[in-house]
Amino acid sequence: MAKPGRPGASKGNKKGPTKGTGGLGRKALEGRGPTPKAEDRAWHPAGKRKAAAERYAAATGGKGRPGGSRPGSGGGGNRAPKAKAGDDTENVTGRNSVLEALRAKIPATAFYIAQRVEMDDRVKEMLSIATHRGIPVMEVTRPELDRMAGFDGVHQGVAIKVPPYEYAHPQDLLEQVIDRGEVPLFVALDGITDPRNLGAIIRSTAAFGGQGIILPQRRSAGVNSAAWKTSAGAVARTPVALATNLTTQLKEFKKQGVFVLGLDGDGDVSLPELQLADRPVVIVVGSEGKGLSRLVSETCDQIVSIPISAATESLNAGIATSVALYQVASLRAAKKN
């Protein structure tokens, strides 16, 4: 006799739990493809920058966006380049910088002038050169020039669009100076990452008879719009070379009779007592914070210090370079007399 069922118990023929979802989650498991690049995501900061660059290019007819650094030709590319992908132009702003670039026949592709700009002799000369060379002259609003100059940039109502800066090779610089019968005087930068410092150093080098600047391929500022502006156009007259490896290049210079002098606060020779000023010299300047790197310091023939007040911890790289170049130029002039 069958046992009576338990009151309230289910009498269904339910089987155990089924395995899987029966295909309900198949689409969810398929995935949605690879993650888009940051610049392809409209909500990402990189995507917003890309969109802004595209809007700027459409407004100005250019292909690149202002303020990018450029790769160089000598010693290995931008360098390392410093150019960002897609950047193939540079905006030079400021009246002195623009005028010097035009005088040096830099192949500018466009000349921008602000509406109702104050006309002085420099602006008149720029317009004359641009017209004579067939460079398109475009009148734009000041807000547009502000965007071209970039953050904290000063355009003074004028700007030009130029190709990427073409870096020389350090060995070519040395050979050219020797062929001209001059005593080499170069400045090499070790870890200078501020383009405004670079521009100031280029300006000082040009002022005190230096024949060129040498930059390392990595961890260095490049010749961009900020460097052009700070140099007051001296970039157009003073060549900048790119070394794939700064230490190796300095050793090559030493083999060819060039003395390497490093600037450092703890130097073994005081600048006023420098005895090598009349020789072929390359002055190596480090960053204000870290100074010269170990390998570069070991490569130097002498480490030179600039006497300063004990109350001052250090000098800005640009100022230190100016002081050293002035001393070398003074000692060389005294030797000639």
Image (spheres, grey):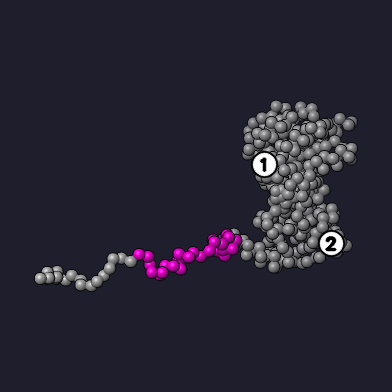
Residue position marked by numbered label 1 in the rendering: 191
The image quarter containing residue 187 is top right
User: Which of marks 1 and 2 precedes in the sequence?
Assistant: 2
> Residue 286: image x %, image y %?
68, 38
Residue nearer the viewer, 8 or 97: 8
Left or right of 21 in this view: 282:
right
Badges 2 and 1: C-beta atoms under 8 Å apart?
no
| Residue under the point 69% across and 35% down | 296
Residue 137, above or below 190: below
Q: Which residues are magenta?
A: 19-44
Residue nearer the viewer, 152 or 170: 170
- For the N terminus, which image quadrant? bottom left
Residue 30 falls inside the magenta stretch: yes
- Residue 230: mark: none
Amino acid type for the residue under numbered disc 2: Ala
Q: Marks 2 and 1, how far apart in space?
A: 37 Å
Taking the image as drawn, is residue 169 in sight? Answer: yes
- For the C terminus, which image quadrant? top right
Residue position marked by numbered label 2 in the rendering: 130
